[in-house]
Image (cartoon, rainbow, N blue to C red):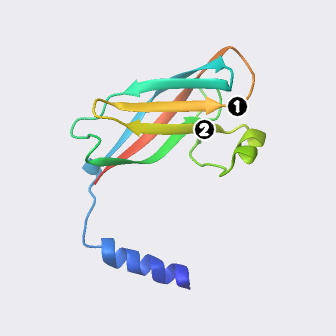
Amino acid sequence: MVGILLLITLLIVVGNKVIYKDNFAILEGNIELVQSDSGLTGTTNINYPIGFNKNNCVVISVGISGSSNLEEETYSFGDLGNKTSAYLAGAIQRNVELTSDNMIFKASFEVSGPAAQTRKYKIVLMKI
C-alpha cells in the first residue's frame, strides 16, 4: 500500500512534465575487454548524440552483452549489489562517466579467461 502511495505521489510531482521520445537516446557499440591484473577490463570513449551533453542528460541504463558471441542478443542491465555476488555470478561491472568532451564507458569482469573478448553494449540517455 505504501508503495502505491509513493508511486501516486511521484506521478503527481512528475506528472506535469511530459517526456517525449526525442529526449531519449540509445547508444549501441562494442567494447574490447583485455586481460589485466584484475581480470578482463576495457574502456571506450563515446561521443554524445546531437543535442546531448554532460549538463543536460543522465544515464538511465547501461547494458552489456552476456556473451562474447556477438551474434547472441542477450544483455545484462542489472547489478548484483555486492562484489562477492558479482564475482560468483560472473557479472561485468560497468560505469559511464559524463565528461565535457564525451562519455567514457568502463567495464571490468573479475575472471581470468581469454586474452581479449569483444562485448556489445547499450547505453540509454535521458535529457533532463
Question: Circle 2 sits on which residue?
Answer: 93
Q: Is residue 48 left or right of residue 44?
A: left
Residue occupying image coordinates x 56% and y 85%: 1
Q: Which residue is mark 1?
A: 110
Residue situated in front as seen by the camera: 99 or 80:
99
Answer above or below: position of 19 versus 117: below
Q: Is residue 70 visible?
A: no
Residue 110, percent from left and from top: 70, 31
Residue 126 position within the rendered picture, expressed as x and y whole percent measured from the top left = 33, 50
Residue extending furthest toward the right:
88
**Is 1 left, or right, of 88 in this rendering?**
left
Residue that appears at 74% across and 20% down: 113
In this view, the residue in front, 21 or 91, is 91
Q: Nearer the viewer, residue 72 or 115?
A: 115
Secondary structure, mark 2, is: strand
The total of numbered circles placed on residues is 2
Amino acid type, label 1: Glu
- Residue 36, image quadrant: top right
Looking at numbered disc 2 in the image, what kind of residue is underneath it?
Answer: Gln
Please tell me whether mark 1 sits on a helix, a strand or a loop. loop
- Given the current orientation, which residue lies at the most extreme left position? 51
| Residue 67 appears left or right of 28 | right
Check whether the beta carbons of the residues at disc 2 and disc 1 lie within 8 A of each other. Answer: yes
Between the C-alphas of marks 2 and 1, the distance is 9 Å
